[in-house]
Image: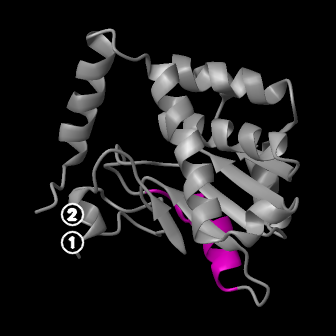
C-alpha cells in the first residue's frame, strides 16, 4: 500500500527534518530542484540530449524557490532559460529568496506581466503554487500555462508538486487551474493527486 499525505502532513515532515538538523530548508529545495530535472529527463530523454528552451514560472513561496533551482540547473545543462516571478523577490521566504539571488547572478528575472508573451519553449515549469495553496487564484495567474496547453506547438508542461490552482488535499480546482503533462512531487503523493 502506498502512503498518501495531506499537505499538512507533508509540511510537518519537512519541519521535523529541518528542526532535527538532518537537513536545511535550502538543502530540501536543492534536492527538489534536482529531482525535478532528473524526473523530466527520465520522462523525456531527448531533452537531456541537447540544449533546449525552458520557461520557468516562479511563485511567491517555496514552490517558487524550487523553480529557481530548476532554472539554475537547466541553465547549467546548457539550456536557454527565461524565468518569470509572480510577486516581489524581496518578499520571498528566506530559502526561496536565497535561490532567487543565486538565479539572479545567472540570468534575468522577468516581470510577471511578460510571462504570457514568452511561452514559446520546449518546456514550461509551473513552480507557482505548491501544496500549500488554499485560496482561489485569479485568472491571470494560470493564464500563461493554460494558453500554452492549448497552443498548436505546445511545450511540455511540468508542475512542481501539483498543478497551480489545485487543492492538494481535495484535488479540486480553486479557480482556474494550470495544466501539466507531468507532475513531480516529493516524498509521497498527496491526496489531491488522486481525488476529484
- Of residues 73 and 114, which is closer to you in this image? 73
Q: Can the viewer see residue 92?
A: no
Q: Name the residue under label 2.
A: 170
**First in residue order: circle 1 vs circle 2:** 2
Q: Magenta part of the protein: which range?
A: 137-150
Q: Do the residues labelled 1 and 2 touch (CB within 8 Å)?
A: yes
SS under mark 2:
loop
Quarter that holds the N terminus: bottom left
Q: Name the residue under label 1.
A: 195
Q: Which residue is drawn at 64% across and 18% down?
A: 98
Q: Can the viewer see residue 108?
A: yes
- Horizontal and vertical percent for residue 178? 52, 68
Q: Residue at x 55, y 58 (%)?
A: 39
Q: In this view, does 11 lie above or below 134?
A: above
For the residues labelled 1 and 2, the Cα–Cα distance comes to: 6 Å
Quarter that holds the C terminus: bottom left
Q: Residue at x 75, y 23 (%)?
A: 102
Q: Is residue 40 above or below residue 86?
A: below
Amino acid at each position: 500500500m502506498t502512503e498518501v499525505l495531506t499537505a499538512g502532513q507533508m509540511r510537518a515532515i519537512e519541519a521535523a527534518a529541518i528542526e532535527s538538523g538532518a537537513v536545511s530548508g535550502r538543502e530540501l529545495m536543492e534536492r527538489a530542484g534536482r529531482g525535478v530535472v532528473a524526473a523530466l529527463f527520465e520522462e523525456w530523454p531527448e531533452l537531456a540530449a541537447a540544449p533546449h528552451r525552458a520557461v520557468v514560472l516562479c511563485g511567491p513561496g517555496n514552490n517558487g524557490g524550487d523553480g529557481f533551482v530548476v532554472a539554475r540547473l537547466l541553465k547549467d545543462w546548457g539550456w536557454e532559460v527565461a524565468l518569470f516571478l509572480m510577486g516581489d523577490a524581496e518578499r520571498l521566504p528566506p530559502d526561496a529568496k536565497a535561490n532567487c539571488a543565486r538565479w539572479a547572478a545567472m540570468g534575468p528575472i522577468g516581470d510577471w506581466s511578460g510571462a504570457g508573451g514568452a511561452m514559446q519553449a520546449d518546456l514550461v515549469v509551473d513552480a507557482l503554487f505548491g501544496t500549500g495553496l488554499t485560496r482561489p487564484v485569479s485568472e491571470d495567474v494560470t493564464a500563461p500555462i493554460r494558453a500554452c496547453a492549448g497552443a498548436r506547438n505546445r511545450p511540455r508542461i511540468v508542475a512542481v508538486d501539483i498543478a497551480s490552482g489545485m487543492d492538494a488535499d481535495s484535488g479540486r480546482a480553486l479557480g482556474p487551474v494550470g495544466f501539466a503533462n507531468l507532475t513531480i512531487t516529493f516524498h509521497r503523493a498527496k491526496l489531491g493527486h488522486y481525488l476529484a
